[in-house]
């Protein structure tokens, strides 16, 4: 079993400076408040798993971190850059943050390797040769180098999601966000994606994962976050979280998803 | 070559056969375009000579209208109120002008605005392109709107800017979807180019009109005209369909 340190409590000053900090973040969709006073702090290298019932604001919360959603109140600081309307700041943050989506969102008209190369070539101004080398390296890392020249439509769901992970890694981000990466997959393909995510976690990547895969959470997470109705109800290390959750809402949720 | 499909060939055969049968009736006088006689041949060549201008006119106009249409469509997709307003105004205003009226306005009206001289060809191109651009704008808007939001989000998450997102992610997918509609517009444009005959453009219709005036055989000459458009458009349709198949071949497993 890996040692589970509560990284937020490490007193070494450098490690303690959070790479992601959300304080007092609120967001409304019209009249409906989706995020209520969200406060989280993620240290470099920390793995945070966010769970909670659907509609609890988990996805919205992590989408705020790379500004796919805008927050209306509070502060979000990513690696020293505060997210405001300033396009330069948004660009800087997106350069540091990779995102993996539930629906993969691969570009269907490009082959796997072209999907990977597009960001490095266009946004990072890399030469096509260097970008191809980097893309091949990351395809290798997600264990599908042989699928490089296939189109997304020719790949299985698990392979598509691994290509999507590799596409994000090609931008060499310091933080990876996963928005229910296995929810759209057939059961037999979930483990191949979780394996890749576990390897990524072991390599020291800072990660926030929204997922209901509790086995993965137990294995990988430094911090568990439970959200319900737009609030963070509980934040704890996995041992405490699964062993003795404090709130009733969290207990009930865990019973439901671990119960079967 | 995939351009001449059995279906296309069949349609042409039926038309030729129909012509042959009707040609036997006493009311027809095919001598006017009989390639075995000297005048017949020169009449025929005169008619076919218009093909060049019809094609040149339509293709130039459609290329311009696609570019203008895209440039009008993009502001319509922004969140800015004024950009949207520009898009709506352009589309509604241009779409309301009949093509013939547009041609007359550009050729006879516009030069009086300043001291500009516009030739027949460019007047025709401008009028056709303007009229068509409003429709192209709507086609592009629909195509771009049909692309799932996740594609934009994925592009943003790998730091692509707006131009790159459009150029490498959204438009290639959108164009594939609107290809049938673009093909439609090209066919429409080929037909509408006949209207430019009213300002004296020497394209297919104008030449047919001129020949009818001297030869008095409107039935045969206009039948040839119909066939010229038919062949042209069948070729274009086959070409568009070939392009669609080729673009689709990519993604299928």
Image (cartoon, rainbow, N blue to C red):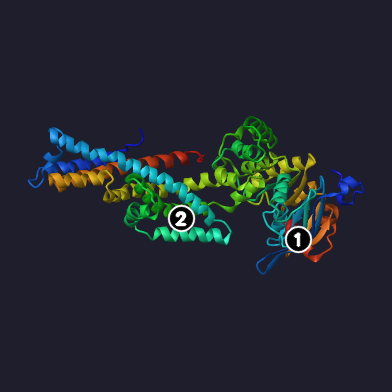
Chain of residue at mark 1: A
Residue lying at 67% horizontally and 69% vertically, measured from the top left: A31
Residue drawn at (50%, 38%) of the image: B250
Q: Residues within 10 Å of mark 2 (few under 14, many from 20)?
A: some
- The CA distance from mark 1 to mark 2 is 43 Å
Query: Looking at this rendering, what residue extends furthest in the right direction?
Result: A11
Say the numbered circle drawn on residue B138. Answer: 2
Q: Front-most of A205 and A227?
A: A205
B92 up-or-down from B11: above or below: below
Q: How many marks?
A: 2
Marks 2 and 1: in contact by CB < 8 Å?
Answer: no
Left/right of residue A68 with respect to residue B20 in the rendered view: right
Q: Is residue B234 visible?
A: no
Most extreme residue toward the bottom is A31
Name the residue furthest front: B115
Q: Position of residue B95 (x, y in %)?
A: 40, 58
Left or right: B80, with A75 as reference point: left
> What percent of the width, then of the height, locates residue B202?
27, 43
**What is the secondary structure assignment of the residue under circle 2?**
helix
Residue placed farthest to the left in the image? Answer: B26
Q: Nearer the viewer, residue B205 or A161?
A: B205
Vertical placement of residue B168 versus B96, above or below:
above
Query: What x and y, as percent, mark residue A10?
Result: 90, 48
| Quarter of the figure that contains the N terminus of chain B | top left
Q: In percent of the image, x 47 and y 45: which residue is there?
A: B176
Q: Chain of mark 2?
A: B
Q: Which mark is residue A227?
A: 1
Along the viewing direction, whichever of A154 and A42 lies nearer the viewer: A42
- Local secondary structure at mark 1: strand
């Amino acid at each position: 079993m890996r040692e589970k340190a509560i990284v937020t409590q490490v007193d070494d000053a450098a490690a303690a400076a959070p790479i992601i900090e959300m304080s007092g973040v609120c967001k409304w969709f019209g009249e409906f408040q989706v995020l209520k006073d969200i406060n989280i702090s993620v240290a470099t290298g920390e793995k945070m798993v966010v769970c909670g019932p659907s509609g609890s604001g988990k996805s919205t919360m992590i989408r705020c971190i790379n500004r796919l959603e805008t927050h209306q109140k509070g502060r979000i600081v990513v690696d020293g850059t505060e997210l405001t309307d300033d396009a330069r700041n948004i660009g800087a943050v997106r350069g540091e943050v990779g995102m993996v989506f539930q629906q993969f969102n691969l570009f269907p008209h490009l082959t796997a390797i072209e999907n990977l190369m597009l960001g490095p070539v266009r946004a990072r101004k890399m030469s096509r040769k260097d970008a191809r080398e980097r893309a091949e390296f990351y395809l290798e890392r997600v264990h599908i180098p042989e699928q490089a020249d296939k189109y997304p439509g020719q790949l299985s769901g698990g392979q598509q999601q691994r290509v999507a992970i590799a596409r994000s890694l090609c931008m060499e981000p310091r933080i990876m966000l996963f928005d229910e990466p296995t929810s759209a997959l057939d059961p037999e393909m979930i483990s191949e994606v979780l394996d890749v995510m576990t390897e990524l976690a072991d390599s020291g990547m800072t990660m926030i994962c929204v997922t209901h895969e509790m086995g993965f959470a137990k294995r990988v997470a430094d911090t568990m976050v439970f959200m319900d109705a737009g609030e963070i109800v509980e934040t704890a290390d996995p041992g405490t979280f699964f062993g003795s959750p404090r709130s009733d809402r969290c207990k009930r949720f865990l019973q439901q998803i671990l119960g079967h | 070559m995939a351009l001449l499909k059995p279906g296309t060939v069949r349609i042409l055969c039926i038309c030729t056969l129909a012509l042959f049968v009707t040609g036997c009736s006493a009311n027809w006088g095919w001598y006017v375009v009989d390639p075995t006689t000297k005048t017949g041949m020169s009449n025929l060549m005169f008619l076919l000579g218009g093909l060049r201008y019809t094609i040149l006119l339509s293709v130039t106009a459609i290329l311009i209208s696609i570019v203008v249409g895209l440039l009008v469509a993009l502001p319509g997709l922004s969140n800015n109120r004024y950009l949207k307003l520009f898009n709506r105004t352009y589309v509604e205003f241009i779409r309301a002008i009949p093509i013939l009226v547009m041609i007359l306005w550009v050729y006879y009206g516009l030069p009086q605005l300043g001291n500009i001289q516009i030739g027949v060809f460019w007047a025709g191109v401008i009028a056709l392109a303007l009229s068509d651009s409003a429709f192209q704008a709507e086609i592009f808007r629909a195509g771009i709107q049909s692309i799932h939001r996740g594609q934009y989000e994925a592009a943003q998450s790998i730091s692509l800017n707006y131009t790159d997102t459009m150029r490498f992610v959204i438009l290639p997918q959108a164009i594939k979807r609107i290809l049938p509609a673009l093909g439609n517009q090209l066919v429409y444009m080929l037909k509408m180019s006949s209207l430019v005959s009213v300002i004296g453009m020497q394209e297919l219709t104008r030449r047919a009109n001129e020949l009818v005036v001297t030869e008095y055989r409107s039935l045969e000459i206009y039948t040839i005209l119909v066939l010229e458009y038919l062949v042209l458009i069948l070729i274009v349709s086959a070409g568009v369909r070939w392009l669609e198949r080729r673009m689709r071949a990519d993604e299928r497993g």
